[in-house]
Amino acid sequence: VRNAVKNALISTQQRFRSLNKNDFIPNGIVLFIGQDIKNNNRMSINIIKPKLSKIRNLHYSCGKRFDLEILSKDLNNFEKYGIVVISGKELYIGSVAGEERKCLYSQTVDLPKKHGRGGQSQMRFNRQRL
């Protein structure tokens, strides 16, 4: 564990050295660095440039989970999308914004079948079922 923290700090320093001032404009950056256990313990570096949150000071956190509190404005601001689903049995109109799902209208429909199951087509229907 101690080596993982040390390697993460070294990777952070190297990454900061490769950045220039324009990379921090207008709201700053957030670096998430961790050891990827699924990929031969290789260091994984993710850079996020927040659109709404302004990063004004250094925040260092070491733990099993990433601290996302500093990005709360960006993570909770989702665009709204409209969804329309039409099938042979129902119609659904709704909206989605992040984790929020809202049903605006839904209706079930009982459409008549195209033809009955008897008459001259009965033998063909029986063959198709097998």
Image: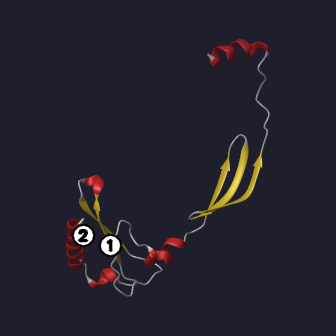
The answer to which quarter of the image holds residue 1 is bottom left
Q: Is residue 116 above or below residue 89?
A: above
Which element is circle 1 on? loop
x and y, in percent, of residue 109 in the image: 78, 43
x and y, in percent, of residue 66 in the image: 38, 69
Task: Assess whether mark 1 and mark 2 are in contact (beta carbons under 8 angstroms).
Answer: yes
Q: Residue furthest bottom?
A: 56
The answer to which quarter of the image holds residue 13 is bottom left
x and y, in percent, of residue 6 in the image: 20, 71
Compute the Cα span from label 2 to label 1: 8 Å
Residue found 66% across the figure and 50% down from its top: 85
Q: Residue at label 2?
A: 5
Amino acid at pointer 2: Val
User: Which quarter of the rendering shows the C terminus?
Assistant: top right
Count up the numbered dots: 2
Pick the front one: 43 or 29: 43
Amino acid at pointer 1: Cys
x and y, in percent, of residue 27 in the image: 40, 83
Q: Is residue 125 above or below residue 46?
A: above
The answer to which quarter of the image holds residue 70 is bottom left
Residue found 76% across the figure and 29% down from its top: 114
Mark 1 residue crowding within 10 angstroms, few (<14) / some (14–19) / many (20+): few
Residue found 43% across the figure and 84% down from its top: 54
Which element is circle 2 on? helix
Mark on residue 46?
Answer: none
Residue 64 vs residue 101: left or right?
left
Mark 2 residue crowding within 10 angstroms, few (<14) / some (14–19) / many (20+): some
Residue found 20% across the figure and 66% down from its top: 3
Precedes in sequence: disc 2 or disc 1: 2
What colouring style does the render use? secondary structure
Mark on residue 62?
Answer: 1
